[in-house]
Amino acid sequence: MFSIILRKIFRLVLLNATAFVSIPVVFFHFRPGFKIFFFGGLIVYLYLTYRIIFYKKPKKQLKIYDGNTIMTIPQYIQLFNDYIEANGNTFKNKIITIINYCKKFIKKKELLDKTLLSTLDRTELTYIKFSSIIDNIENSLVKNLNDVMLRLHSFDEDEYEQILRNTTSMSKNYIERMEIFKDYIKYVDNSIDFIDMILLKIDKLQLETAKIKSLDVIEIENLETVRDIDKLIENMKMYKI
């Protein structure tokens, strides 16, 4: 909100500075028709001032997300950006965090794959095992993103803001509705924690690849980081409402 106000102030200052400089220029070059230029410019100035102060960009209309089709991480990033454009500020910062985490995951996955291929061939069992672990991590992340998107599309932003404004009401319905909204928010917070944990496990797995030359498939399965990842994926239900 504060950044929007600053942008409006900057545009107003720029508009007034432009008008201040333009008036003498128009007067000296178009003196006979100065009144026409002046009133025409005044109309444009008033219109632009109105646009800067009062105009609000219409919200983007979202298609209903049914969650039936699991998408790729870049596709979810685009869906999250679309959601931010079309909705209020309740989840904005949280979604930005999720988007940044998703971008980090993509980079970490690419780095890990390059590290593995620097010492292994794609056909080696050790590489195949590591690739399987990474794929499982990504699948769990994508499933989590799908669940988050479903809840975001079920969240009634307008009603939530209306309830927040009506803080004097302490009826049973008010309290129950607030609990429902809190559950939505809690779920997104837990999902952020889950994705952050995935990034941490990827970092640890990256560290384990330093030992890659001395590992075989059986030893990979017994790595502490790999066991932690398996446990994390199995316990995904802990992060649900």
Image (spheres, grey):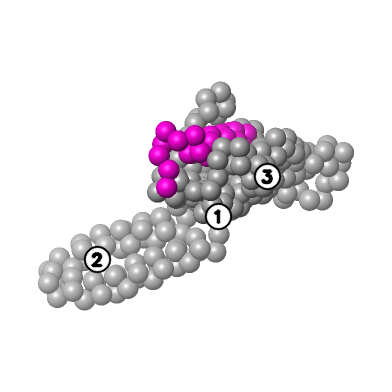
In this orientation, which residue lies closer to the viewer: 140 or 123?
123
The three-letter amino acid code for the residue at tag 2 is: Phe
Give the extent of the magenta segment.
119-148
Q: Which residue in the protein does label 1 denote? A: 207
Q: Residues within 10 Å of mark 2 (few under 14, many from 20)?
A: some
Q: Which residue in the protein does label 2 denote? A: 38
The three-letter amino acid code for the residue at tag 3 is: Asp
Query: Which percent across, then down, holds residue 133?
Result: 56, 38
| Residue at figure coordinates x 29%, y 74% from the top left | 20
| Residue at figure coordinates x 82%, y 38% from the top left | 176
In this orientation, which residue lies closer to the viewer: 24 or 34?
24
Q: Earlier in the sequence, mark 2 or mark 3?
A: 2
Q: Which image quarter: residue 153? A: top right
Q: Which image quarter: residue 148? A: top right
Left or right of 214: which side holds 240?
right
Q: Which residue in the protein does label 3 denote? A: 228
Q: Is residue 132 above or below residue 190?
A: above
In this orientation, which residue lies closer to the viewer: 239 or 21?
239
The disc label shown at residue 80, or none: none
Quadrant including the C terminus: top right
The three-letter amino acid code for the residue at tag 1 is: Leu
Q: Secondary structure at mark 3?
A: helix
As drawn, the residue found furthest toward the top would be 68
> Can residue 92 be found in the magenta stretch?
no
Query: Which percent across, then down, holds residue 134?
Result: 53, 39
Q: Secondary structure at mark 2?
A: helix
Query: Which percent across, then down, holds residue 240?
Result: 72, 37
